[in-house]
């Protein structure tokens, strides 16, 4: 189902962002950032969406997820929601370590954290039909001036919405906490396909 209600979606090319209206709320996101982390062509360890490789496909997928989201509070988390069939299957890029796999992991610096990574043949990375998404209260400090561009395009300021959210992350597979949760990440690893 293509997005036909252009009133709901605003593309902000100068900031590189998109905005989707949901009732009295607005959700902003930066597709290139999200695709770089978990899109079909992402070049890093972790979960990957097989069929999401373009801004259009990602925007369509996020549009679907926002419709099932309950936007309340300053942080909203969708955890392990079923991926719509038109999106297809994705890769679950996180596993719990056992005694054998603990011996095979390497450490990789991701952001400010050293994370366990297990390199395996791509055919062994388990498929998933689950997705996770985290939205937080929009902070203009990290918004690349999307608020000003949105107002210029639509004539509406962010202040007219009850709440404006930014998508912090969206990824397929099992829910996983941020990398600074050392208790979790000491016992889990990101999967990376063998090159």
Image (cartoon, helix red, strand yellow):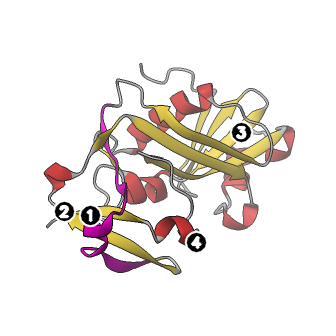
Q: The C terminus lies in which quarter of the figure?
A: bottom left
Mark 2 and mark 1 in contact? Answer it, CB < 8 Å: yes
Q: Identify the mark nearer the N-term, 4 or 3.
A: 3
Q: Identify the mark nearer the N-term, 3 or 2.
A: 3
For residue 24, above or below residue 12: above
Disc 4 versus disc 3: nearer the observer: 4
Q: Position of residue 131 (x, y in %)?
A: 46, 40
Instruction: Give the number of the disc on residue 192.
Output: 1
* Mark 4 → mark 2, Cα distance in angstroms: 24 Å
Q: Position of residue 105 (x, y in %)?
A: 29, 74
Q: Is residue 91 magenta?
A: yes
For label 3, the SS is strand
Return the residue nearer the eye: 57 or 186. Answer: 186
For label 4, the SS is loop
The residue range painted magenta reads 88-109
User: Which residue appears farthest toward the front when viewing the image?
Assistant: 99
């Amino acid at each position: 189902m293509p997005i036909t209600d252009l009133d709901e979606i605003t593309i902000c090319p100068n900031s590189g962002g998109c905005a989707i209206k949901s009732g009295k709320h607005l959700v902003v996101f930066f597709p290139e950032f999200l695709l770089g982390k978990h899109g079909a062509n992402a070049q890093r360890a972790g979960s990957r969406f097989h069929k999401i490789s373009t801004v259009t496909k990602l925007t369509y997928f996020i549009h679907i997820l926002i419709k099932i989201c309950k936007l309340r509070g300053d942080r909203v988390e969708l955890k392990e929601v079923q991926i719509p069939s038109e999106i297809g299957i994705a890769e679950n890029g996180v596993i719990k370590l056992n005694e054998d796999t603990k011996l095979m992991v390497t450490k990789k610096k991701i952001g400010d954290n050293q994370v366990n990574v297990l390199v395996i043949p791509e055919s062994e990375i388990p498929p998933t039909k689950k997705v996770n998404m985290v939205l937080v209260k929009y902070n203009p400090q990290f918004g690349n001036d999307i608020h000003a561009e949105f107002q210029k395009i639509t004539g509406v300021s962010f202040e007219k919405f009850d709440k404006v959210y930014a998508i912090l992350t969206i990824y397929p597979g099992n829910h996983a906490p941020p990398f600074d949760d050392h208790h979790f990440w000491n016992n889990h690893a990101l999967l990376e396909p063998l090159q």
